[in-house]
Image: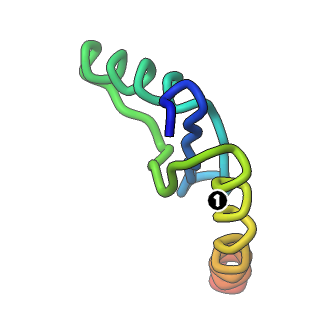
Amino acid sequence: MNTTDAYALLWSKRSNCFHVEPLTDTVRKGRTFFLTNSSNDYLLIGLGTHDEVAKAADTLRPHMVERDRKERKVA
């Protein structure tokens, strides 16, 4: 896989949502967080072509929906 064609699948715990972006953006942002000694809420959970990460998001979405349902029930 060419890195210019690579995409990152990110998940936010706080928002309980997915985000897809070019891997180069993920690396650039990660480096900025490192250099500024900061962090964000998004975790890298998948890597591949745009189609591959979209399929991964579709596969993982039921887990995200179930998590949201459980947290709403507790609140």
Q: Which residue is mark 1?
A: 16
Residue 33 x, y percent position in the rendering? 34, 22
**Residue at figure coordinates x 73%, y 81% from the top left:** 69
Residue 64 lies in what quarter of the image?
bottom right
Relative placement, left or right, of 29 versus 58 is left
Is residue 67 shown left or right of residue 69?
Answer: left
Relative side of 31 to 49, left or right: left
Which of these two is toward me, 15 or 44?
A: 44
Q: Above or below — where is 21 with respect to 15?
A: above
Residue toward you, 20 or 65: 20
Pick the quarter of the image with the C terminus.
bottom right
Q: Closest to the observer: 71 or 36?
A: 36
Q: Residue at x 66, y 42 (%)?
A: 20
Measuring from the top left, give residue 25's x and y in whole percent: 53, 23
Residue 47 versus residue 75 in the image, above or below: above
Q: Which quarter of the picture shows residue 40?
A: top left
Q: Residues within 10 Å of mark 1 (few under 14, many from 20)?
A: some
Amino acid identity at mark 1: Asn
Most foreground residue, 37 or 44: 44
Q: Position of residue 53 (x, y in %)?
A: 64, 54
Residue occupying image coordinates x 51% and y 55%: 46
Residue 8 image position (x, y, % from top left): 55, 42
Residue located at (49% from left, 23% from top): 24
| Residue 17 drawn above or below residue 35 | below
